[in-house]
Amino acid sequence: QVQLVESGGGLVQAGGSLRLSCAASRSIFSISRMGWYRQAPGKQRELVASISSGGTIDYADSVKGRFTISGDNAKKAVYLQMNSLKPEDTAVYYCNAVNSWSNYWGQGTQVTVSS
C-alpha cells in the first residue's frame, strides 16, 4: 500500500524551477511533521526541508533562499517549490511524514538539473 504519493520531478535546466507535491494516505494520521529529503548517487540521504504541523520550518543551508516548503494539514500534503535550481540539486527526492508511531517514506521522484 502506497502511503505517500509524490509528483512533480523531472528534467530542468540550471536556473529553472520545479514544484514537488506529496500527499499522505488516510492510513497515516496525527502527522507531526512532513518534509523532503534527497539522495544523490554515492551520497547519503539528506534533509532538504521540513515543516511541522504547527508551521515550524527547517531548511538545509544549501537550499535556503531558493526552495520554499509549504504544507496543508487538512489535505495531509506537503509541497516544495524549487527555484534557481543548480546541477548539484540533482538527486532522488523523497517525501517523509512522521507521527508518534512511525516514520513514512515515499517512493522517490527524480530531479535532474542540467548545466
Image (tube, grey):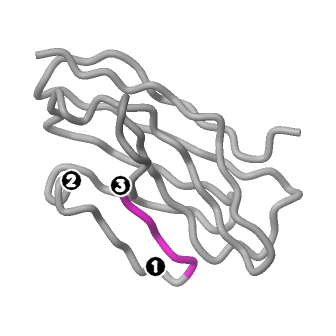
- Crowdedness of circle 1 by 10 Å Cα count: few (<14), some, many (20+)? few
The disc at residue 48 is 3
Tag count:
3
Q: Quadrant of the C terminus?
A: top left
Left or right: 34 as drawn, with respect to 24: left
Residue corresponding to mark 2: 63
Q: Label 3: few (<14), some or many (≥20) within 10 Å? A: many
Q: Residue furthest front?
A: 42
Point out the frontmost of discs 3 and 1.
3
Q: Amino acid at mark 2?
A: Val
Tag 2's secondary structure? helix
Horizontal side of 97 relative to 39 (left or right) equals right
Instruction: Tell which circle, 3 or 2, labels the residue nearer the N-terminal end.
Output: 3
Q: Are marks 3 and 2 in contact (CB under 8 Å)?
A: yes
The residue stretch that appears in magenta: 48-53
Q: Quadrant of the N terminus?
A: top right
Whichever of callouts 3 and 1 sits on the residue coming sooner in the sequence is 3
